[in-house]
């Protein structure tokens, strides 16, 4: 009888060890490569990872009670922060986190006062959401200047893609 108990115990310990190793590997299954200041150069996502796509979002008005045609949205930094907060809310509502974001696509309109896109202002807001002590993951990203967006006054629209390993892994 004691030999049977030893075998069962050995199998249980082996199974727990294999499960722990598999869980650690599942967490590392999404590989981030070539880290830069704000983003990674590449991110590898396994085919069996869960995916979440967040449609393009823009900023909320800084004066939301004004009539639609009179609403304003602030400078690019303010708009980027507002937009990332909307994205964060959408992601968390779906049960995900900003740490799951692997790709950010950004469309910027030239800031009227600067006469060009405010890349620095955008990066200040971006750095509050990615690569922080609370949320150290960074995505890959693309930032392009466009002539205009769907809502007059918007300087920014952002869409993101998130991936994570299934909970069962």
Image (spheres, rainbow, N blue to C red):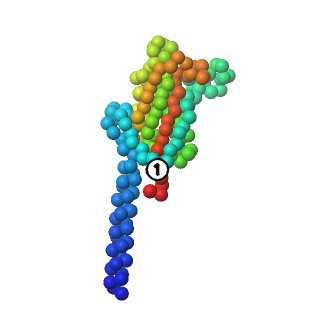
Query: Quick check: 51 left or right of 135?
Result: right
x and y, in percent, of residue 154 in the image = 55, 22
Q: Position of residue 17 (x, y in %)?
A: 34, 65
Quadrant into which the N terminus falls: bottom left
Tell me if 162 is positioned left or right of 13 in this view. right
Q: Which residue is drawn at 60% across and 22% down?
A: 151
* Residue positioned most to the front: 47
Q: Where on the picture, by quarter, is residue 23?
A: bottom left
For label 1, count other residues whose C-alpha is less than 10 Å away and answer few (under 14), some (14-19) or many (20+).
Answer: few
Q: Mark 1 points at which residue?
A: 48
Q: Is residue 67 above or below residue 165?
A: above
- Give the residue at the far bottom of this rendering: 1
In this picture, is 30 found above or below 2? above
- Count every numbered label the image shows and give the total: 1
- Furthest residue toward right: 67
The residue that appears at 32% across and 36% down in the rendered structure is: 35
x then y, percent, for residue 145: 47, 20
Q: Is residue 82 visible?
A: no
Q: Is residue 87 visible?
A: yes
**Residue 55 coordinates in the image, percent (x, y):** 56, 34
Q: Is mark 1 on a helix, strand or loop?
A: loop
Q: Residue at 44% of width from left, 56% of height from top?
A: 169
* Residue at 55% from the left image edge and 31% from the top image edge: 56
């Amino acid at each position: 009888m004691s030999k049977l108990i030893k075998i069962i115990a050995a199998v249980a310990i082996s199974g727990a060890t294999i499960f722990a190793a598999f869980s650690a590997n599942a967490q590392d299954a999404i590989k981030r490569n070539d880290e830069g200041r704000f983003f990674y150069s590449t991110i590898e996502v396994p085919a069996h990872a869960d995916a979440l796509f967040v449609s393009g979002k823009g900023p909320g008005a800084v004066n939301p009670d004004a009539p639609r045609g009179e609403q304003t949205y602030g400078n690019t930094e303010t708009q980027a922060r507002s937009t990332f907060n909307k994205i964060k809310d959408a992601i968390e509502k779906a049960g995900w986190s900003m740490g799951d974001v692997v790709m950010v696509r950004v469309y910027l309109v030239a800031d009227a006062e600067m006469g060009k896109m405010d890349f620095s202002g955008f990066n200040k807001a971006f750095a509050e959401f990615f690569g922080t002590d609370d949320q150290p993951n960074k995505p890959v990203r693309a930032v392009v200047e466009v002539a205009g967006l769907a809502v007059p006054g918007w300087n920014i629209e952002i869409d993101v893609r998130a991936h994570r390993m299934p909970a069962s892994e």
